[in-house]
Amino acid sequence: MIPGFEDGVKGHKAGEEFTIDVTFPEEYHAENLKGKAAKFVINLKKVEERELPELTEEFIKRFGVEDGSVAGLRAEVRKNMERELKGAVRNRVKSQAIEGLVKANDIDVPAALIDSEIDVLRRQAAQRFWW
């Protein structure tokens, strides 16, 4: 995000045309824009506000929380986050161990072993994505 852009849009209404002056940050991904000043002419077509659903018992039960309580939902979310964190830590440790072994041992790894490890990592990534 470009600093000042969002603030420059806030408060305007649909149908308005206005100009925003900003400066791209030095760490911006496009080399040719880093640190450069820019002027955006904006024609605001539509303004929407995100409406969050009410945390009703029915809504909460749709996420598999049997008692339908906010406390139950929080506990379920916490459990899922802890499981994800545990898996991420395990994968990080595994990656660091493998990296350390590779750096310490100059050996040729068979292509079949590399392919097998790639398959394992793909399956793990797919499981994390779907859970």
Image (cartoon, helix red, strand yellow):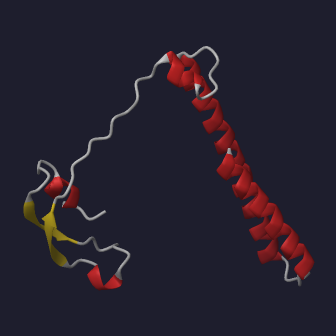
All told, the count of numbered labels is 0
Q: Is residue 33 above or below residue 80?
A: below
Q: Is residue 21 above or below residue 85?
A: below
Say whether residue 109 is left or right of residue 3: right
Say whether residue 57 is left or right of residue 9: right
Coordinates of residue 67 in the picture (x, y in percent): 61, 14
Considering the image in quadrants, where does the C terminus appear?
Answer: top right
Say whether residue 72 is left or right of residue 121: left
Coordinates of residue 91 in the picture (x, y in percent): 73, 55
> Residue 3: in sight, yes or no?
yes
Image quarter of residue 30: bottom left
Query: Residue at coordinates 78% horizontally, 58% vertically from top-left?
Result: 123
Taking depth in this image into account, of 13 and 24 the one nearest to the observer is 13
Coordinates of residue 128 in the picture (x, y in percent): 69, 50
Q: Is residue 94 above or below residue 106?
A: above
> Residue 88: in sight, yes or no?
no
Query: Residue at coordinates 85% horizontally, 74% vertically from top-left?
Result: 115
